[in-house]
Amino acid sequence: MAVWLKGHLAIQPFNRFMKVFWKIIATGFGSGYSPIAPGTAGALAGCLMLWGLRLVFPGYFSGGWDNATGLVWLILLFFFLGVKSANELESEWGHDPSKIVVDEMVGVWIAMLGVPFSLLNLALAFLLFRIFDIWKPLGIRKLERLPGGWGVMMDDVLAGVYSCVLLHVYLSFSAIK
């Protein structure tokens, strides 16, 4: 059904579609609806998505800096989709509700930047990211105060950066790669 608004045809089904689209993105493909630890569920969804992408596109998601291009594009795409989806849903859900977990997905992907891909490294990235995301030390909490979707996303970006740095330090001194 279409209605006329101020001389323009507004297509209500498209608006409903976009609202559903933003909810799918914001909730990490539904993982944010988890009744227990939705942030952890979102980060796990990010790990599973990265694992699946690695299986389908090994040249772009096999880890290390030589193959980081696909991951960088994925991070950028979902970062900006996350900002937009949080902005679109803020009037309905409030600022940074627990069901918005696209930020956790992006954060765990950042933690894996340049890291050789293995189940152990993915688990370490997940663990480090969740520690930084929950405790929010070293300026992470301050970034939550940014307006709208920027505040939703940026604290997890910084948690991912700290996790990535620690993981690279660990791997540089470890025999386990």
Image (cartoon, rainbow, N blue to C red):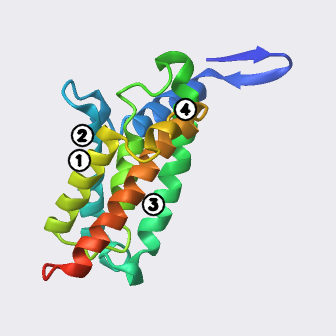
| Precedes in sequence: disc 1 or disc 3 | 1
Q: Which of marks 2 and 3 is nearer the N terminus?
A: 2
Tell me how far mark 4 sits from mark 2, CA to CA.
Answer: 21 Å
Answer yes or no: is residue 34 visible.
yes
- The three-letter code of the residue at mark 2 reads Thr
Q: Viewer-nearest of labels 4 and 1?
A: 4
Q: In front: 145, or 150?
A: 145
- The foreground one among 151 and 169 is 169
> In terms of sequence position, does the residue under pointer 4 or pointer 2 come before the other?
2
Residue denoted by label 4: 145
Q: Where is residue 127 in the image (x, y as percent from the top left)?
A: 21, 52
The residue that mark 2 highlights is 40
Q: Name the residue under label 1.
A: 44
Q: Is residue 74 above or below residue 131?
A: below
Q: Which residue is drawn at 57% across and 40% down?
A: 150
Q: Where is residue 174 in the image (x, y as percent from the top left)?
A: 17, 79
**Badge nearest the viewer, 4 or 2:** 4
First-in-chain label (4 vs 3) = 3
